[in-house]
Image (cartoon, rainbow, N blue to C red):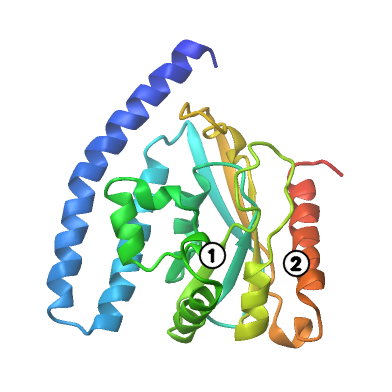
Amino acid sequence: MDYLKIYSLNLYSYILFAGYSAVCIPALTLFVAFMSLIVGHRRAMRLFRRAIAWWSRGILLVPFPFIKVCYENDSGDTTGEPYIFVCNHRSFSDGFLMAVLPVEGVQVVNIWPFKIPVIGFFARYAGYLNIRMMQSEEFFDRAVQLLGDNVSIIFFPEGTRSGNRKMGNFHSAAFRLALKSKAPIVPLCISGSENIPPKGSLLLRPGTIRVRRLRAITWSEYKEWSVFTLKNRVRELIGTELSLMENRV
């Protein structure tokens, strides 16, 4: 596809994104606000977080069929929620991809998403976490409380986008939380997002993004492991699966 077609795709996608968001965000906000008058706070928060996922799913459909997102779940998990999801991180779009997960969840994000108008407000209200903006004890207390409320937590432990197929080192917060909470860890493999858009750019390129969910690692399996062992084991599982997905083995 030549650059004229790529620029046309981006113009189309961003105009549609703006129009869709201008209608969807107020509509969902009013819906959740109305429902919060009827249901309790806990159910209202669940609905609010699901509304964010509904909006994000719409975002994923905006550039279709030029950009396709495929969610693959052959894990056969029967452990039940809540989960700690651990994902590799290649692109700005990875956060939106988490809408494919059929769970109530919050993400552990960097500082910059909270600074985005509208999106930052909703992320903060939904309880998204940032360990850089919180004391360590507060972070883990809130995370454990969320898991206790049956809310899954989504980590990108590389901490920043790699921008390519090379996976960076993992930070330890997700795995320290797992050892504190005993929640099952679910590795997620994201393939194809590295150019949608490329790091440092907002220029979308056509392609297919695949999100593959691996089998959960349960407390009975990892309870004897150290944080270091658990971290490296999950990173190895994701790296091996990505190589299979991308025919690099």
Residue in the image at 63% along x and 37% along y: 163
In the picture of the structure, the residue carrying the numbered disc 2 is 231
Q: Position of residue 96 (x, y in %)?
A: 45, 50
Residue in the image at 82% along x and 71% along y: 229
In the picture of the structure, the residue carrying the numbered disc 1 is 154
Would residue 125 be found to the left or right of residue 95 on screen? left
Identity, as a three-letter code, of the amino acid under mark 1: Ile
Say above or below: 109 vs 83.
above
Picture quadrant of residue 35: bottom left
Label 2 SS = helix
Q: Earlier in the sequence, mark 1 or mark 2?
A: 1
* 3D distance between C-alphas at marks 1 and 2: 15 Å
Identity, as a three-letter code, of the amino acid under mark 2: Lys
What quarter of the picture does the C terminus occupy?
top right
Q: Position of residue 128 (x, y in %)?
A: 42, 64
Q: Nearer the viewer, mark 1 or mark 2?
A: 2
Say above or below: 225 vs 70.
below
Q: Position of residue 202 (x, y in %)?
A: 46, 30
